Amino acid sequence: MSLASQEVSRETLTLPQLHQAKPPALSWGVKIRKKLKAPFLGKYRPLVGQCCHQCTPESLGRKLLHNSPSLGFQDLLCVNETHTRYRGWLVRRVCSVLFVLGRKVHSSPAGDRMKGICSGDRVIAVTGLGGQKDVSEEDGSEGLGSVLAVLQTAVRPAVLRLVSWMLLKMFRLMFRSVQVNLNQLAALHRASQLSGPVVYVYIRQSAFDQALICLALFFHNLRVPYSVCPVQVQHGWRRAVLQKLGVILLPRHVDTELQAETDRSYSLTMTSLIGELLGAGESLSFGICEESGRGGQWLARVRQAVTRGLVPDVSLVPVAISYDCPSHMEKLPQLSRAGILGFVLSLLSGDHRGDVRIHFAQAFSLKEMCDSGKCRVDGRRPLQEILLPTVLHNRMDSLFGQKDISWLLPPNCLLELPQTEREMTIALTLHLMYSVTNSLAVMSTSIVSCLILHKHRRGVRLSVLCRDVCWLLEEVLFRNFDVGFGGSLEGVVYFSLTLLRPHLLQATVPPAGDPVLTAWPDPHSLLALSQQSDLLTHVFIHEAVGACAVSAMLREAAGCGGGEMEFDVALGQEELTEKSLQLTHLLPVGYTIPCQTAHTFALDTVDSLVCCGILVMEEAPHAVPVCDLWKRQGVLSWKVSDDPEQSSDSDCSEPDSRSYKLSQPTQCPELLFFLCSLLSVQLRALCWTIESLHLLPCPMTDSACVTQLHTHLRNRAQLDRVHHECSSIKLVRKAVRTLTDLGVLMEDRQSEGVYLDISPVFLQTENKQKLLQFVSQFLYG
């Protein structure tokens, strides 16, 4: 069954081909059938990365970003003599050196900037230093000296060229290709000429995010931005090199980014540094952590520079980086010298090089978004005020509010920010996180992992997998998400299976020549597949939320009837929307449009189920909806739609305007359960976390709480023996965040850290069970 309600308009456009000759015979024991080998990519390409039409209409109207096939894509790692001004045998062997030497570098000495920062009134009040005094690490205390040493950061052209050449060589070992959209880079050139400094914002994924962004900009003669490093680097030679590349490091006397932000001298000095950099026309890049929101304080500093008149305006550019296999690069900055050497040697022997796709979304004006008044940030309420009345008392009066997410900018960061500025910074952070997520390219390994994990958990034949890859690809493109691969179906599937081979199990069954593939039932493999398929949840988030709401209502119908699940049931529009709204409030940040209300999102989920063919509108307009879940008298009433004798027994005093039925009531709808499975990983992790709360020795620090819960979830997965993907540390952090917003876990912020304790309300077994039932109603399987 196709999710698309209509055919997608198609244009002739060539996608980047896989940089590989005709693949050898498949090591899986069979060559993919010839009828499936026809090229299937390159017919349609969505325009991704456009800025918000509601909050930044003027930036959208500039038409800087065009969906033109004239430029296409470029592999940054493919440098040859055509990229230089010279030709010849010798040039072909030193073309990388000549190319790097020919790039334009915008240098920026740190001397004048240091005096400007140290002469600021607020910095003088905290540090006691004047603008005329020479600054060094020996000034004042050790902490103050290490903070002031960070100000020595500057871009040195010679060091930048040398390191860029070394990165080019290293990335050739690590990746098969690094693709960039030349139309987007052309738009960046136009944006940098029309407006002021450019600030690049990305979501932290890998240790090489910043390096890839800087390399792409350097190779295309764009200004290399000053980058913020969120991890501690203690080695002296590494700090010296990174500072000469424009990397803003943490001071030596702190261990974490959060600890550094509690130092007032560091916070004020960094605020002044950002103002000086932007005032001098320099670019900036930093990442935001998806789970904790860390990194949003740098956006607040950029906003302060604009409001104080240090720079007229700033162009914000969301940057989306998609990896085929990012897991082996996450811990590289924390490795020792021997560990890094071992990592590099492993690259020479392994056949796990994946592709990388970088998308630079359309630049939009920071001043326009903040000053136009179209970006609404008021009227938000704590999640516990919105959902707890529904969970504990089945009340719906507060369900239609907007949940507050003030934790995206921790209160111990930038204490001098007014409340309105904090709210605006949070709104900007939400917009950028959503823009980055929706600009990510879906990689081939993501599609194959999603199908194996969520659609064919018990195994799938290779021919069926190829068919479903075509189907899922069309659905991804239909929803205006780009893909990070191209070529023939044979090449794409072969490449994906090669990268995922350590996590897959092959079995040969009749008919011979069509093997069966399934996931290895071990924690590492399932976690890796789940990580790769996570982006597909964002792609189908409307359908997934709606499918979980339908599944919850069908389960309640089965409970009321006392029998098996009945699919031939009419579902009221109002009740279906409210179920979707409940689940919407449980979603982590980044899934919903920031300038859209939760109720509007819930309405869209119902419409999406109709568009994709899962639901059809009830034909009889006079029929009374059979689902009456939330009437104030607390009566639960259901009826089977083909039973006319019960139509007068409904307790529905105000009939819904519409009701829906499943399009395939006579059989288990496979598509419905596939969509439910996309959210089941997060929901099951949340349920397991709720079940493990009584095992916590509260109160305890938030980091210790996450560590303890992670251990409990891994033990729970071992008992479950199936859903190991629900025990990742990332899901534990999201679950703790959700429970904190719900008021289940109470925060106590102290000078030494944040402590968590269980609310007295949920120490009662009855209330804890109600919460567990509320979450588990949406859980499939």
Image (cartoon, rainbow, N blue to C red):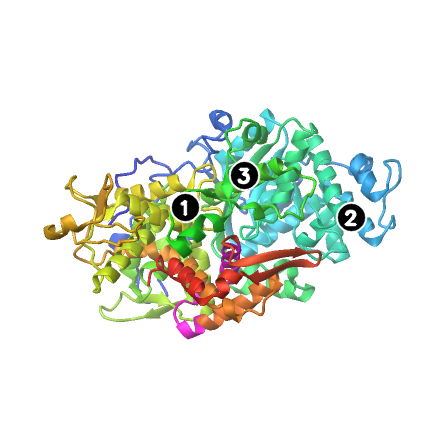
Which of the pair 94/582 is nearer the observer? 582
Range drawn in magenta: 717-740
Q: Which residue is mark 3?
A: 427
As drawn, the label of residue 147 is 2
Identify which amino acid the numbered label 2 is placed on. Answer: Val
As drawn, the label of residue 86 is none
Spatial CA distance of label 1 from label 2 is 46 Å
Counting from the top left corner in percent of width and height, residue 13 is at: 37, 37
Spatial CA distance of label 1 from label 3 is 21 Å
Please identify the dominant SS of the magenta region: helix
Residue 632 covered by magenta stretch: no
Kindly identify the residue that appears in the image at 81 percent across and 43 percent down.
126
Counting from the top left corner in percent of width and height, residue 699 is at: 61, 65
Spatial CA distance of label 3 from label 2 is 29 Å
Counting from the top left corner in percent of width and height, residue 514 is at: 27, 65
Mark 3, secondary structure of its residue: helix
Is label 1 or label 2 in front?
Answer: 1
Which of the pair 515/618 is nearer the observer? 618
